[in-house]
């Protein structure tokens, strides 16, 4: 696999443009109309530049090229840190026991989400909800979220994008019946949050709690063949 840090993701165009305009207007108002100059203006101007660069960094985007596909390997759907690995009941789609693996995305992570396996999209659903912190135990069922299910042969996995305190916008690019390849863009969570993935109970888990993972690169589990 080869990764290139290339450009800004399309989800950030509007926010970046609005941020640049607002910061420019604020600086002009301070300097020309409120008479703020000297060290005070320099500090504000530098802070504005740093804030703008921070916003831009939220939407950095890399191209992912996968040199080979493996139906038995589950790739991480998001950049971040593993915060949950446990056996749970999944009531929305499977209605049975599954292994839940959760990835927390900090504001410093790349926020694009990718398909963990190749297959056919069998289910998508948006759920409005609250905005609890992403590591809250009930954020998976109470927060705003988007659920997707991909079927590959005899196996199906569920991916749940979850909004948090900062993340108030989830984008999902999948639709029922769509055929996807491993590593395709699944969606985007603005300003980070959390992604849960629900795997068959007999899947072999290859990651540990607090481990950092890379979207479309880290093999988080292997399906039983």
Image (spheres, rainbow, N blue to C red):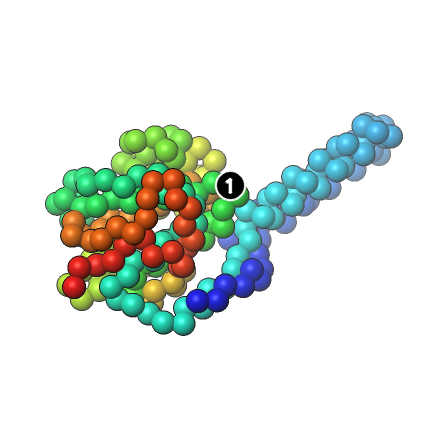
Residue 118, compared with residue 8, is above or below; it is below
On the question of residue 131 being in view, the answer is: no
Quarter of the view holding residue 117: bottom left
Residue found at x 16% / y 40%: 89
Residue found at x 26% / y 50%: 205
Residue found at x 37% / y 33%: 135
**Local SS, label 1:** loop
On the question of residue 81 being in view, the answer is: yes
Residue 7, position in %: x, y?
A: 58, 60
Residue found at x 75% / y 37%: 46
Q: Residues within 10 Å of mark 1 (few under 14, many from 20)?
A: some
For the C terminus, the quadrant is bottom left
Residue, far bottom: 67
> Which of the two residues, 153 or 174, is positioned nearer the viewer here?
153
Residue 42, position in %: x, y?
A: 81, 34
Residue 50, position in %: x, y?
A: 68, 40
94 sits left or right of 62 in the view? left
Q: Dot 1 corresponds to which residue? A: 107
């Amino acid at each position: 696999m080869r990764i290139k840090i290339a450009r800004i993701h399309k989800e950030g165009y509007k926010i970046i443009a609005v941020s640049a305009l607002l910061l420019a207007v604020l600086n002009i108002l301070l300097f020309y109309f409120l008479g703020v100059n000297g060290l005070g203006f320099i500090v504000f101007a530098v802070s504005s530049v740093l804030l703008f660069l921070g916003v831009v960094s939220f939407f950095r985007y890399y191209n992912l090229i996968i040199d080979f596909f493996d139906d038995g390997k589950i790739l991480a759907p998001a950049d971040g840190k593993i915060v949950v690995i446990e056996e749970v009941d999944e009531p929305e789609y499977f209605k049975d026991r599954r292994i839940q693996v959760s990835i927390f995305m900090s504001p410093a992570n790349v926020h694009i989400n990718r398909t963990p396996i190749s297959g056919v999209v069998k289910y998508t659903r948006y759920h409005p909800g609250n905005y609890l912190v992403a590591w809250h135990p009930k954020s998976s069922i109470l927060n705003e979220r988007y659920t997707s299910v991909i079927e590959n042969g005899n196996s199906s996995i569920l991916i749940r994008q979850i909004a948090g305190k900062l993340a108030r916008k989830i984008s999902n690019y999948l639709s029922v019946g769509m055929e996807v390849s491993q590593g395709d863009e699944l969606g985007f969570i603005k300003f980070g949050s959390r992604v849960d993935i629900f795997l068959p109970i007999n899947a072999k888990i290859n990651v540990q709690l607090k481990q950092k993972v890379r979207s479309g690169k880290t093999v988080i589990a292997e399906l039983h063949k």
